[in-house]
Amino acid sequence: MHLKSFVLLSLAVGILGCKKDVSKVEGNRAVPAKAAPANGSDTILFGHVASLTGEQATFGLSSDEGIRLAVEEQNARGLVRGKKIAVKTYDDQGKSEEAAIAATRLIVEDKVTILLGEVASTRSLAFAPIADEKKVPMISPSSTNPSVTKIGGKTRPYVFRVCFIDPFQGTVMAKFVRNNLKLSRVAILKDVGNDYSVGLADYFAKKFVELGGTVISEQSYKDGDQDFKAQLTQLRSKKPEFIYVPGYYTSVALIARQARQLGIKAPFGGGDGWDSAKLYEIAQGALNGSYFSNHYSEENQDPLLQNFIKNYKAKYGAVPDALAGLAYDSANLAIDAIERAKDMSPEAIRQAIEETKGFRGATGTITMDADHNPVKPADIIEIRNNRGTYNTTVEP
Ligand code: PHE
């Protein structure tokens, strides 16, 4: 059995076995933590909101593994302010409403010290206002849309992230296509129900046009769509040299396969949402010659990253994706901030996260800027032989 399916199955068994929680949760399923999850006086509880099932299940599963590895390593090293760390995860099934319910429950019922999650910007946006209102610090490992931490020109006081943001990621790819690949006619295919996809498409297009290129066609789809032939036929008639698809892996892989069936040969490009082993499984080679921007490459020789990869492999038997690395960093940054905070109040922890400077994570060094975003480089991954290979690193 494939490892991820095994993990999924074990989680499902765990979930079904956890009757009491299920009946209380109304749609959010509790994943039992190994240690007693109660936020008693001897534990600091982290709450994780994650898509453990649904279209983007690998996002939630990878993130949860990264967080649990960080916490396990910390508990083995020693106590944090005299306490052990525990994690409680609720499955939001990849749905925004469920994400908001899960976050509320973690805050109100479980009384977590920190909220970790979500991966998808749309779902982080569903509970960022709740974190602010209830004054519980939230760290998204991997949501890249700017509005997650800043809305209407105002930084959300309690919301942070440990990854770069989409204006940067879109610019990186636009420059790469224009300056490195020397292409000038691109088409865009975006997921209109997804804040991340819509934002990234815009940032890419803006930069690409600024650099003298042309966006010859812009088409859209919705998460869950299975048939993209109408949009692809439209694109084909315009003869694009490159097709930018800033979506998530399941749709992207299906789009690429259908494009090849229609005789479209142009390479595809995208962002971090492509990053999953499932992308290659579904694409079956259709994405060879394509590129995407990502948070890290396993080929980066940074000793902290390599050490994380080694420990992750030992625990889970697979190479971590970027999400696992970012989630690992989000939990470690939370621990670091709790240790630095002047007391255990939410405001003191919030302030400690805000003051983070030069924190060395597996995915890079984190210094929070005024908008609660770290400034980090992006890697360009090239797909060859149905595998992601490191191409280059772009500094901010
Ligand atoms: N950045 C994506 C978003 O904001 C989520 C994502 C991150 C997906 C990293 C895959 C890898 O929606």
Image: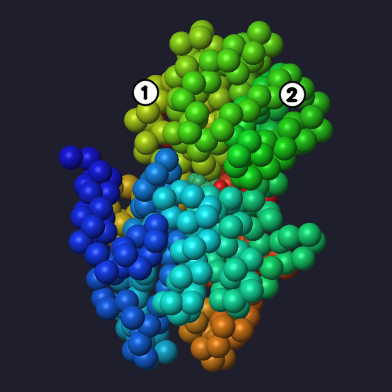
**For residue 315, side relative to residue 283 (left or right):** left
Q: Is residue 261 left or right of residue 179?
A: left
Towards the viewer: 304 or 195: 195
* CA distance for labels 2 and 1: 28 Å
How far across and how far down the image is residue 3, in percent?
Answer: 23, 45
Whether 298 is drawn above or below 328: the answer is above
Q: Which quarter of the figure has residue 33? A: bottom left
Answer above or below: position of 379 versus 41.
above
Q: Relative to residue 312, is residue 275 drawn left or right?
A: right
* Tag 2 and tag 1, C-beta contact below 8 Å: no
Q: Badge 1 is on which residue? A: 284
As displayed, is residue 223 above or below residue 66? above
Q: Secondary structure at mark 1?
A: loop
* Kind of residue sitting beneath label 2: Val
Which circle's residue, 2 or 1, is located before the other in the chain?
Answer: 2
Q: Is mark 1 within 8 Å of ligand 1?
A: no
Provide residue 134's location: percent of width, then percent of height. 59, 76
The answer, for residue 385, to whether it is visible in the render is: no
Q: Which residue is mark 2?
A: 215
